[in-house]
Each structure stands twice: as C-alpha cells, then as structure tokens.
Amino acid sequence: MKHGILQSHSTLVTFCNHLLDILSIPLSFVLATYLTNQLSFDLRFMLSAAVAAIVFQFIASFRGLYLSMRGESIATEIFKCGKYWLVSFAIGFSCFYALVESSVMYDKAMLFWFFLQLGYFALSRFSLREFLRFMRRKGYNQRNVVIVGAGETGRKLADNIITSPSLGLKVAAFYDDVRTGAMQISGETLEIVGNSQDLIDDAKRVKIDRVYIALSMRHDAFIKKIVAELADTTCSVLFVPDMFSFELLNSRMGHLNGMPIISIYDTPMEGGNRVVKRISDIVLSAIILMLVSPILLLISAAIKWTSPGPVFFRQNRYGMDGKAIQVWKFRSMKIHQNGAIGDNGNKVVQASKGDSRITPLGAFLRRTSLDELPQFINVLQGSMSIVGPRPHAVAHNEEYRQLIDGYMLRHKVKPGITGWAQINGWRGETDTLDKMQKRIDFDLDYINNWSIYWDLKIIVMTIFKGFVNKNAY
C-alpha cells in the first residue's frame, strides 16, 4: 500500500478545500454581476459576499463538512453544501439590500450568484472525489483497517470495503477470540491473525489507522474492555452494531437530544420525503382524474344499466400506520340478498376464477383494473397514494399478520393504487401462503428503497404491464 504525498498532506488538502470555498463565494458574486451586465461594482458588493463566505465557513466547520468524507455519499455532501449555502446566501442577501437600494438588475445578479455558487460546490466536490478515487485505485491515500469479529457482520463489512475501493480503506486482517484461519471475501484472502489481546499489542506497535468492532451487542462487557485498551493507542475506533440479526426496514442512524439512536423499522415518509410524495400524488391524481373523467362516466352508466345496485362501493382497509380507511371502487359484484356487495371487510372470501358473484361487466373491469380508478379520489383525500403496497381487507390483515413475519410493516407507508409487487405479477388471488409472502417481500423491498424516481418508474411500468393480468379476476 502506498501512502504517498496525499497521505502525508491530507491536512493541506482540507485547508485548500476551505480556502477555495472562501474565495469562490466572492468570485462567483463578481461573475454573477458581470453576466447580468451589472458593472457598477463597489465595496458594498464585496462586503456582502464576504459576510456570506464567513457565515458559510462558520456553519460548515461547525457542522463537520470538512471532516473525512470516507463512507459518505457525494449526494449527501452536496446536499449539506446546499443547505449551508442557502443560509449563508440569505444572510448575504439581506446584508446586500441593507446597503444597496433594491433593483431588478440586482435581483437578477443575486439569483445568478446563488446558482453559480451552488454549481461550484457540486462541481468541486465531484472533481475532488473523482481525483481521490483515481488515486486510491492506484493504491495511494489509503487507510489500514482491521476488523474485530469474523462473524456475519464483520464479513459483510469487509465485503463492503473491498468492493468499494474509492473509500480508500484497506482491510489488513481480522481479529477474533473464537475463530481461526483464513477466509475468501470478494476475491481476497483475509486471515484471522489473532485474538483481542493480539490486537491490543499490534495496535501499539504496528500502523493501524482504524479498528472496526463488529461484534454482537450481547458482548457489551467484552466490547468495553477492548475499547478501554485501545484508548492507549492512536487508532480510530469505530463500532459496527450487529444489525444483521434483524430484518431492517428503512434503518438509519439518528440522535435524540444528543443521544445516538438506530431505527430498526422506520418509514421513509419523513420530512421532505412526505411533502414530495404528497405533492406528486395530488398533481398526478388530479391530472389523471381529469383525463379519465369520460371513462368514469361511461363505466358508471354501464354498471347502472347492466345490474341493479350502486355504481361505487367502499371497502374497509388498513391505511398508513394501520389506521382504518375506506377504499373506493367501481362495483363489480352482484348485490346479495342481505344488501351486501362482495364482502364487508370483516368476513372475506377472495374473488376466484369463475366466481359467481362477479358480473360480466365486473369481470372485465377487474381484469383491466378499471374498477380501481375511483381510488384516485382516495389519493386526493390523502388516505392512499398512487404507488404503494396494495390495501388488503381487514380480515386478511388480521389473518396474515399471524402467519408472515413483518407483515404489518407494509403499513409504514400509505397503500397504493399500484405497487412494486403488482407490476412484478404478484396481484390477484393469494390462495397460498407463498403467494402472499412474495407480495409482502416486494412491498417491503419497495419501502426499504423508496425514492420518487422509483415511484415514477412503477407508474410507467404499470401503464405497459400493470393493468391487465391473468391473476386479476
């Protein structure tokens, strides 16, 4: 492994990053005034830019922006820059208009300034990462790390590091008090070179940059002992919780009044994600309802003409967080003698092939998913989303939550008109436990990896392959 000039001058790299950020803010201001033909530049302009630069440096340093970026995604770093720059820009903007009279030309220059600087932050971070990635692939600027614990967590950690050379980390060995020998991980042979005492001895005399402790949380006393011993070395010590014993759902780190916490089961619909999801649902459902309104009228008339009873019916379902909701659908079944339509949500018999309860028109509506169009009203009301796990009858929920581990976790998001399970063929009758298990697996996969891009992808895929399905009857 080559440490080289980057390793010994990492502080200089960080200093240059600081300096370039400071200089770029007033320089982007000058460029913005030039691009907007605002050439009457004076000291008041520079003072406002200097205030913004100082505020940015204060916030960025306080929030740890310039600490090691190893293990942090570029999107996260750019997002941080954007947040801190927004605050700094607002203060510089206020300072500017406190010194200079308002003008449309100035407004244009300020807008250019904001986006020019934002572009610089993105470009500079991307360029630096690409440079470091290139150097690290050549063997420079790497850190020697060892892993305490050769169990599943330790092996997964080693695999993660080995398959991500851009992190600049090199797994030198394992230490384990129980296991011995060597193992193959991602094409590399990693040896278990000793136990915890050997680790302490090696850390005092050999260059080890980081020690990752990947042990089960039930070994807390043993972990405390290792950490106390490593305090007599210069190693950075990091604890990797043994989370693989849990089925994680949207797991992430957090803080509660300064206390670190780890979520095991959580929803992706927090903060900005919830807002983005809701806005997209409102906009898309409103557009879709306007476009399909002639179809809704035709189906309504056809239902009234072909069989007695109401056009719509509402089914009791579980929504987000297990709260009761009523889902709208076009009626596709005959009215029973007692006035019920199909099922009442408490005692359910799923529709099956050749089901006598289904009207001829209803069979067509169910096969083409047209019976579900009224659910866009649920989306506008806020009880459903366009994309999400399909809502099941209340009785089915109560049945399957006893049979399938993690079944109720599908309610960490709003139910949807279409979903990841449906476009992968897992819709319609679930006459075996395996079929329901598959549907739940896809639902949880969707929740665990949710993004607005994935929602749009599912919507597009639904148009081409999600409406008509051989299992829908």
Image (tube, rainbow, N blue to C red):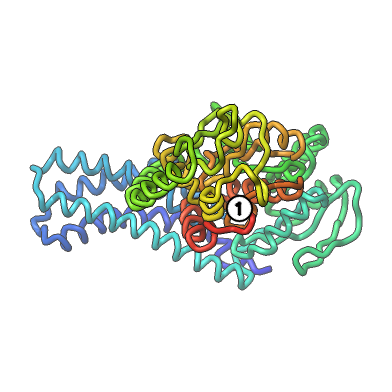
Relative side of 56 to 92, left or right: right
Q: Nearer the viewer, residue 207 or 354?
A: 354
Secondary-structure class at tag 1: loop
Q: Is residue 57 visible?
A: no
> Image height check: is 63 above or below 164?
above
Q: Which residue is mark 1?
A: 472
Tell me if residue 326 can be seen: yes
Drawn side of residue 435 relative to residue 21, left or right:
right
Quadrant of image for the N terminus: bottom right
The residue at the point 60 percent across, 37 percent down is 342
Q: Position of residue 330 (x, y in %)?
A: 48, 42
**Is the residue 328 above or below the residue 291 in the image?**
above
At x 20%, y 40%, the residue is: 95
Task: Please tell me which residue is depicted at 43% across the width and 53% down the height of the picture.
Answer: 78
The single residue placed furthest to the bottom in the displayed view is 138
Residue at screen point 59% across, 27% down: 338
Asked if residue 319 is positioned above or below residue 140 in the image, the reply reads above
